[in-house]
Amino acid sequence: MKNIITKIGVLITIATMVTVSSCKKLLYEEPKDAPYEQTFWQSSRDVRSAIAGNYAIMRSAITSKNNRYFMYGDAVAKNYFTIQYGGDGLEGIQGGDFTFQYNINTLANYTLYYKSIAMSNLILKKVNAMSDAQLSTEDDPAQFRNSAIGQAYFLRALSYFMMIRVWGDVPLVTEVYEDPINAPQLPRSPKAEIMKLIENDCHKAINLLSWNYENTGDAKVTANKGSVYALLAHLYLWRATMSDVSVDAPNLTDVNNADTTINTLINKGGYALTDTANYKNTFVGRSSEGIFEINISENTLEGSNSSIGSYFLNENYIKGYGNNPRFYTNPSYLKDHFETTTDIRYKKGFDLTNPDKPMSVKYSNVTYRNPGQKLNPYLSNNIIIFRLSDMKLLKAEIALYKNDAATAAGIINDFRKRNDPNPVLIPAGSSVDQVMDEYAYERGKEMYLEGHLFYDLLRTRRYTLIVDWLTESRFRREGFYWPVDPALFRNNTLLKQTPYWLGKV
């Protein structure tokens, strides 16, 4: 497919227009006028516009509200980094209180994800109905159609996966409503149903997409088979461990499914670990180990002036930012996680000029749009959703669920040898519990500030190592899920509040 990502900036407006056939009760959208409906969906150019718009909407959902993807996946586990007071109450989430007014009205609202889902649903309906004649400018209309539909299935699955990890049960929308004003109100569907849809969407996408990209400009930042396999692996492990939190034993059927999925990804995907000499290039984006990323690149003028990385950086990295960034890495995190100071992830990932408030510099690829005067700074670091190191480490988690401590220890030790000339290795004969602790710390080193850490701790039941507000009692009551913004109830009387937050919101 011709380069989609370079069009995202100008196509966000188109995306807004073509999303309007969605459920108004959920998305607060206005009906699209008929003349526009009749003039769109007539050519492959229209399809590209819609797909680019879908990626733009997904990016908006992830980066909105103080980069919500990282707030949910990292920030709530407060002992990784600290959010300093800024007047908006954002720091409250680090104490496990998600009821601050600002957070309820923003982070507890899932509307943006449903905009992406609505766009996916629309693409699935409209592109399926387009004839080969309408797609005749393509060398292979059937392949083009398959790619478009496969990407829509992937983005719908990814949106739902992100939501179930935050809210658990969510409304299930798979239809395009031609009359959104009179569309049905929808209750929250059980998370088991949502996960089954995600699984089915992934299988459909795998059958439609290829491993390769027709255009190199689309590599890593649009979906291929590898992207879908990575999502499916995470889904299986989440379902294996989080479907019933009253017990700790994982569902081994899903564990084995994750294992098979990752093996296929590693064997067929053609991915390779980035050389540690180029450590930070992984987080610029499009590296050899990138599987799926959200494009935030200044190469296409899509950099960010509000990236998660910029919250950690001071004047030494971005002119005009002062010397007291709002976020800083906790010194205790560094002390607890890194056995040596020779680990490349320690040396290149953090700036300890102020040892009381270390800076994460994982995302610090700064570009000035006015370089002469160093004005208009933008970070050009893609958001890495899935990468090879993530998949390889998940193999250790799978081994531990199968009570194979030796295999898991070997995988973790390989990471330590790769990243540290003086590694402290897990000794032979360590128990499953001991290696699981080491695994949690290794994920904390490797996946720091990539949106995975809190979910890792929930799956592995190692949340007590890091998240002091999450007691076992609260965990068993699913108190890690977020409440739903009360504003959403005004337009949907069938919605119910997240059980843990009943009476608290």
Image (tube, rainbow, N blue to C red):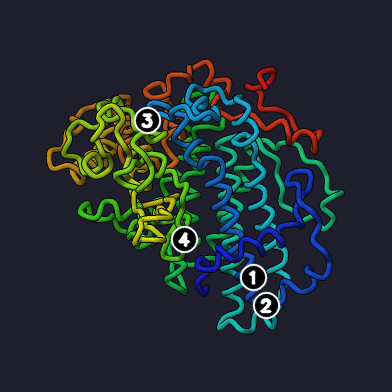
Q: Residue 47 carries which label?
A: 1
> What residue lies at 76% left-to-right and 37% top-to-bottom?
187
Q: For label 4, count other residues whose C-alpha is less than 10 Å away and answer few (under 14), some (14-19) or many (20+).
A: many
Residue named by callout 4: 221
Distance of mark 2 from mark 3, alpha carbons?
48 Å
Comes first in the chain, label 2 or label 4: 2
Q: Which amino acid does label 3 sit on?
A: Tyr
Q: What residue type is labelled 2?
A: Ser
> What residue lies at 72% left-to-right and 63% top-to-bottom?
125
Q: Residue 499 carries which label?
A: none
Distance of mark 2 from mark 4, alpha carbons?
23 Å
Image coordinates of residue 137 in percent, x first then y, are 61, 84
Residue named by callout 2: 43
* Left/right of residue 149 with respect to residue 217 in the rendered view: right
Comes first in the chain, label 1 or label 4: 1
Q: Is residue 264 visible?
A: no
Distance of mark 1 from mark 4, alpha carbons?
17 Å
